[in-house]
Image (tube, rainbow, N blue to C red):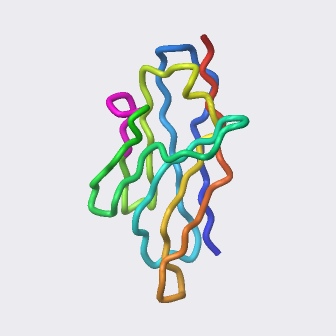
């Protein structure tokens, strides 16, 4: 089995910073892309940032220049450094990863999410 466990969510004031972490654990042979998504109440889940195994990243326009995604392949961990936070960033942030276990193909896994709340 594979699990993704997020941490780092918190209540922060406008303009503040947070760092989210997501660790992939379990029967893992290889991890391809990893990413962060978010879902606010009453809204659809949206991609925040994704990063390839080689470190190529892409961001949604709403966070570009404020958020930075990174990963440590040796630790099966992906990070999201968030700065200049706004109330619109308030959401549950979910980790996603494409992981190959015993099967010869990749599956998409999701974490349970971590709450980020930005107060005005």
For the magenta stretch, what is the residue range? 63-69
User: Residue lying farthest right?
Assistant: 42
Q: Quadrant of the C terminus?
A: top right
Give how far across and how far down residue 77 sits, in percent: 45, 55
User: Residue lying farthest front?
Assistant: 43
Q: Residue at x 38, y 36 (%)?
A: 61
Compare residues 99 and 62 and report the one nearer the observer: 62
Q: Residue at x 60, y 34 (%)?
A: 9
Give how far across and how far down residue 33 sits, in percent: 40, 63
Q: Is residue 30 above or below residue 20?
A: below
Q: Residue at x 56, y 65 (%)?
A: 25
Q: Residue at x 37, y 61 (%)?
A: 73
Q: Is residue 97 above or below residue 82?
A: below
Give how far across and how far down residue 67 sits, in percent: 39, 34
Give how far across and how far down residue 93 sits, in percent: 59, 42
Q: Quadrant of residue 69?
A: top left
Left or right, 63 with respect to 88, comes to: left
Q: Is residue 20 above or below residue 112?
A: above
Q: Is residue 45 above or below residue 4?
A: above
Q: Quadrant of the N terminus?
A: bottom right
Compare residues 44 and 82 and report the one nearer the observer: 44
Left or right, 21 with respect to 57, comes to: right
Left or right, 2 with respect to 34, comes to: right
Q: Quadrant of residue 64?
A: top left
Figure label count: 0
Q: Is residue 20 magenta?
A: no
Q: Quadrant of residue 10?
A: top right
Compare residues 18 and 97 and report the one nearer the observer: 97
């Amino acid at each position: 089995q594979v699990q993704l466990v997020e941490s780092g969510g918190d209540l922060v004031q406008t303009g503040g910073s947070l760092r989210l972490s997501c660790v992939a654990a379990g029967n893992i042979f290889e991890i391809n892309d990893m990413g962060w998504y978010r879902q606010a109440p009453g809204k659809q889940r949206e991609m925040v940032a994704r990063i390839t195994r080689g470190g190529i990243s892409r961001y949604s326009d709403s966070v570009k220049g404020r958020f930075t995604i990174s990963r440590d392949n040796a630790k099966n961990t992906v990070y999201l450094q968030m700065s200049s936070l706004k109330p619109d960033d308030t959401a549950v942030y979910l980790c996603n990863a494409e992981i190959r276990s015993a099967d010869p193909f990749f599956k998409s896994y999701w974490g349970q999410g971590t709450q980020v709340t930005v107060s005005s």
